[in-house]
Image (spheres, rainbow, N blue to C red):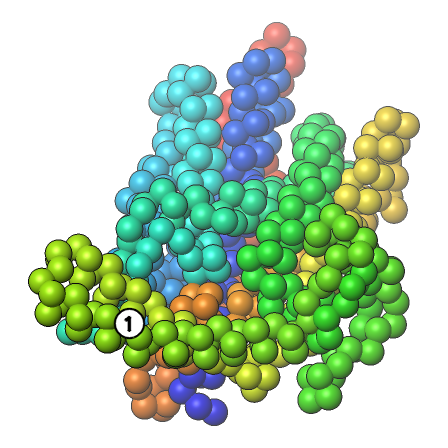
Amino acid sequence: MDLLTLSRIQFGMTAFYHFLFVPLTLGLAFIIAILKTIYLKNRDKRYDRLAMFLMKLFAINFAVGVATGLTMEFEFGTNWFTYSKFVGDIFGAPLAIEGLMAFFLESTFIGLFLFGKERVSEKMHTFAAWMVALGSTLSALWILIANSWMQTPAGYKIVETPQGVKAVLTDFWEAVINHTTVFRFLHCVDAGYIVGGFFVMGIMAFYLLKNRETEIAKIGLKFSVIFTAVVSVLQIIFGDIHGYQVTHGQPLKMAMMEGKWETEKGASLDLFGIIDQDKQETKVLLKVPYLLSILSFHDPKAEFKGIKDLIKEYRQISEEAKNKIPVLEQKLKQIELQGASEKEIENLKSELALAKANARAYNIDFKDLPSVALVFTTFHIMVYLGFFFAFVTLWGLYLLKKGTLYTNRAFLWTVLLSIPLPYIATEFGWIAAEVGRQPWLVQGVLLTKDGVSFHPTGNVWFSLIFFTLIYTGIFIVFLYAMIKAVKKGPVFKYTKSNGSLTAIKEV
């Protein structure tokens, strides 16, 4: 196995593990903040107990998420040094802001929430919950800003330095709010809300099936069904808009997601298919005529470009960039001899550097493509699961209206067994997005193969095996801690007052 493949597997493995914990952090923090707000308004202790219990689970998840995420920061320098050197001036800023602003905000108020229960006012305790939710959301925002720049780069220029070619920031806000950041952020964060919603629904269903903590479980299930129904329906809308953006900003990725090798007018949406990458064809098993053109261009007769024609277009862009290079070099010599301004010379040098980058980055062939079957399959499973989540939660709303939500065992077992499914959907969505971006690290500017560090493959093998063992051990400990906490449940000490029992402190 070559160095590039090993480095990609190692980063993919660490990112896969880390991303198991990110969505629940986003969803659970927001749910806890809402529950604390409800308690602050109606003073129903059950909402407070539920929020405190969920924060215990959140803390376990958060701790493991931090531990698994730190490695990725170092891998940028160890395994992807050339990439880090190329994008460091741009990519480093959002990562630094995420760490300094979002992470510390989140971690500080987690401590206040967990250990300040009887030391601060209820308003401050609720404020701490919202700060945790805000911190986790801002963390996701800055990470997605960095990722969106890789997908659809904006607000930059390419310069040649003695240390090599690199991207330099020219417009911070254009880079931050580029073509796809907003809806990529909404799509990702809403996916976290779905993970959190199904997580809470499943745990509450577990208690009802076991006839334990029934009062807490009932309010938790009712709240999570309503919450998750809303975010599941919203996800269908966000996903559609984001898919439209991908079609126009990253057409090759969308062509791979849809398994389209040939250009089609009035393109069908292929629901099921078998990809044969060697023959460059997709055997379609079920399709809906015209629907892909409608979704992608809002026109049933619109042309959807296939992989083959897109590669031809990219190679043409590469050729045009190559032809542009000697012209720009000659022009640069002329203006330097003519004593042009430093700004004019710098602009022309940047244009020349970009032409060189485009000439190499767009010079791709079919052998440079990732596994189209992997992109196609993960994308389609993510979409199908998204509709499944909406169906299940709408079913829950129907049962709630009928008054049978807490006793319908079919529904309770469904949501309990469905806890892993939103995790699968988010992981598959990440795979489709990141593998589908290949063969580029930065779309149209830097090829993945040009971003890797130069190490003996034995070193990467060793670190890959070592990280896999460590991460597997961490995950086992995480599962043990979470299962133990759920089995224990929100246990409280009680005091007797006026003939009734009142919860005073969680143990």
**In the figure, residue 405 lies in which quadrant?**
top right
Name the foreground residue: 118 vs 403: 403
Estimate the x, y position of residue 101 in percent, counting from the top left.
Answer: 31, 40
Say left or right for 210 vs 176.
Answer: right
Q: Residues within 10 Å of mark 1 (few under 14, many from 20)?
A: some
User: Dot 1: what SS?
Assistant: helix
Q: Is residue 153 above or below residue 32?
A: below
Estimate the x, y position of residue 70 in percent, counting from the top left.
Answer: 35, 60
Q: Is residue 11 above or below residue 408?
A: below
Name the foreground residue: 5 vs 485: 5
Say left or right for 36 vs 397.
Answer: left
Q: Amino acid at mark 1?
A: Leu
Q: Residue at x 80, y 73 (%)?
A: 273
Estimate the x, y position of residue 442 in percent, counting from the top left.
Answer: 42, 66
Q: Residue at x 30, y 86 (%)?
A: 455
Disc 1: which residue: 328
Q: Residue at x 46, y 30 (%)?
A: 129
